[in-house]
Amino acid sequence: MTTNATYKSFSSVVINAEVGLHVGLYGINVTLKGNPVVQFNETINYNEMFSWQDLTEEEYEEALEKGLPNPILYIVEKFTLHSPCGLIFQYRYSGRFASATLWTAFCSWLLSNILFSMPVILYAGYMMIVTAGFIFFSMASFSTIMNVPQCVFAIGTDSVLTEYSHSFWLALATGVLCTVIGTVVVTLNFLIPEKMKAAFSVGVDGCEDEDIFYGEGYLNSVFLDGAHSPLSLRVKEVSL
C-alpha cells in the first residue's frame, strides 16, 4: 500500500512510501520503498527479512538500534512474542504444519514418479491423489489463521490488509492438477488396463515370454559337422 507516514523516531519528517508485508512459512518480509526513492537526502528502499526464530525481543531491540524506519518497526512489533496481537503464534505454528505437509507431498510426488516407471500404474495414480491430499491439507492448515480476528496494521491514514498471494494459488492449482492426473490414471487403469500398459511402455513379464510360439526351423548339415550333440550325429548318419 502507498501511504504517508513518519520516517523515523524523534523526527517530524513525513514520507510518501509503499509499504509491503509478505508472510511466509518461515518468517515475514517487510519492504519500504519511497515514492520517489530519494527523499530528504536519503535513499528510502528497505527490504528486511525476519524469521520466526529471530522474532524475539532481542532481535527487535537490534532493529531499533539499527535505526530502521518507523513503518518497518511498527509491523515487526506486531509479530513479537509479547505483542497483544499474538500473530507470531498463529503464523508460526500454522507455517510449521504447512511446511511439513508440503515436504510430505513432495516425497509422495517423487514416489508416484518412480511408480509410473514400473508396472504398477494403478498405485502411481493413487500416490498422485495422496500428493494432492497433502497439498490441500497444508493449504487448510495455513488458511486457519484467516478465521482468527485479524490485528489492525494502521500506518499513517491507511491500514495493511493481508490476503493470499500467488504462492497460495499456485499451490492450489498444483493440488487440483495432481487430483485430475491421479483420478484419470486410476479410472483408465480400470477401463482399459492393456492400453494403459502400452502407453506407459510396460513390458511383458517372464510368464508371457514362455507362451511365445517359435515356428519351424531348418538345420544345415554343413554347420553341424563340428557339433557333438545327438542331433548332429543323426544328421551325419542320414547323409551317408
Image (cartoon, rainbow, N blue to C red):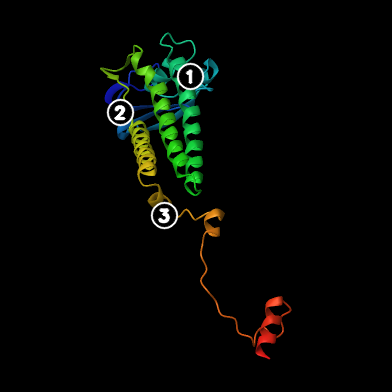
Mark 1 vs mark 3, foreground winner is 3
Mark 2 vs mark 1, foreground winner is 1
Disc 2 marks a residue whose amino acid type is: Ala
Give the answer, above or below, for where 27 lies relative to 190: above
Give the image location of residue 108, x and y in percent.
49, 36
Q: Residue at 27% across / 24% down in the picture?
A: 3
Q: Earlier in the sequence, mark 1 or mark 3?
A: 1
Q: Earlier in the sequence, mark 2 or mark 1?
A: 2
Q: Nearer the viewer, residue 178 or 75?
A: 178
Q: Mark 1 points at which residue?
A: 93
Q: Mark 2 points at which residue?
A: 17
Mark 2–mark 1 distance (CA, rounded to whole Å) = 32 Å
Give the image location of residue 162, x and y in percent.
32, 22
Q: Are marks 1 and 3 in contact (CB under 8 Å)?
A: no
Give the answer, above or below, for where 45 lies relative to 192: above
**Circle 2 SS class:** strand
Q: Residue at 48% across / 19% down in the picture?
A: 93
Give the answer, above or below, for where 223 lies relative to 230: below
Q: Residue at 38% across / 29% down in the picture?
A: 31
